[in-house]
C-alpha cells in the first residue's frame, strides 16, 4: 500500500503503508505524536520544503528528491536519509546509506552500521557503532568527532574541531 499526500501529515496512531509520497506543490509539514512511529518509506518529489513539527521516528528511509527537509530544531531518528536537511539540532541514524546529504547542522549520532558516502556535517559527530565506506569518500566535520565505536574504510576525514577516540579508528 502507498499513500500520496498533497497536504500535511499528523500521525497520532499507527502509520504502516510501505510508501508515503509527499507530493505537495507548496510546503508540507509532518507531525508525530510522542511515542508513535512512522513505519514506512518517505519520498518527496515535488515539494519545495518539508518541515517537521515534532521529532520524527521513521522505521524506513526518507528520500528528498527535490527541496529539503527542515527539522525545525527537532530530532530525526531514522534508518536512512537522502537529500538536504537543515536546522538539525541532533540526529540519530541507525543505518544511513546516502550519497547526497548536505549541510547537516547539529549533533549527529550514529547508532548502527553506517555506510555514509561523503558530505559535510556542521556540528559534532558521535559514532556509537560503525562508520564505514566501501569506496573512497571525503567527509568534512565542522565540529568534534567522538568515536565510541569503529571507523573503517577508504576515506578522508577533514575535522575542523577536536577528535576524541574511545574506539577503533582504521580508515585506509
Image: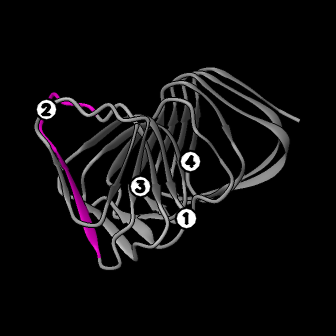
Q: Is residue 27 left or right of residue 22?
A: left
Task: Identify the disc placed on residue 65.
Answer: 1
Q: Which residue is mark 3?
A: 21
- Label 4: how many Cα within 10 Å (few below 14, some 14–19, many 20+): few
Q: Quadrant of the C terminus?
A: top right
Task: Identify the disc placed on residue 13.
Answer: 2
Q: Nearer the viewer, residue 21 or 143?
A: 21
Q: Which residue is mark 4?
A: 162
**Residue 33 part of the magenta-drawn span:** yes
Dot placed on the residue nearer the N-terminal end, 4 or 3? 3
- Label 2: how many Cα within 10 Å (few below 14, some 14–19, many 20+): few
Q: Is residue 98 left or right of residue 126?
A: right
User: Quick check: 65 above or below 170?
Assistant: below
Secondary structure category for the residue under label 2 = loop
Secondary structure category for the residue under label 1 = loop
x, y percent for residue 151: 70, 30
User: Quick check: 167 above or below 53?
Assistant: above
Please say if the residues under marks 4 and 3 sit with CB atoms less than 8 Å apart.
Answer: no
Please say if the residues under marks 2 and 4 sit with CB atoms less than 8 Å apart.
Answer: no
- Label 3: how many Cα within 10 Å (few below 14, some 14–19, many 20+): some
Residue plotted at (23% across, 45% down): 55
Chosen colour scheme: one colour
Residue extent of the magenta highlight? 27-37
Amino acid at each position: 500500500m502507498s499513500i500520496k499526500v498533497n497536504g500535511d501529515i499528523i500521525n497520532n496512531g499507527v502509520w504502516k503503508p510501505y510508501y508515503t509520497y509527499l507530493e505537495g506543490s507548496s510546503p508540507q509539514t509532518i507531525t508525530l505524536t510522542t511515542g508513535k512511529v512512522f513505519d514506512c518509506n518517505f519520498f518527496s518529489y515535488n515539494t519545495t520544503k518539508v518541515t517537521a513539527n515534532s521529532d520524527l521516528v521513521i522505521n524506513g528511509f526518507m528520500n528528498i528528491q527535490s527541496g529539503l527537509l527542515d527539522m525545525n530544531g527537532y530530532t530525526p531518528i531514522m534508518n536512512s536519509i537522502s537529500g538536504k536537511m537543515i536546522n538539525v539540532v541532533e540526529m540519530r541514524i541507525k543505518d544511513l546509506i546516502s550519497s547526497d546529504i548536505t549541510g547537516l547542522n547539529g549533533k549527529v549520532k550514529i547508532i548502527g552500521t553506517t555506510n555514509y558516502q561523503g558530505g559535510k556535517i556542521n556540528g559534532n559527530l558521535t559514532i556509537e557503532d560503525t562508520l564505514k565506506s566501501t569506496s573512497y569518500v571525503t567527509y568534512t566535520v565542522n565540529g568534534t568527532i567522538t568515536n565510541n565505536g569503529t571507523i573503517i574504510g577508504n576515506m578522508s576525514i577533514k575535522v575542523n574541531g577536536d577528535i576524541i577516540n574511545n574506539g577503533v579508528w582504521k580508515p585506509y
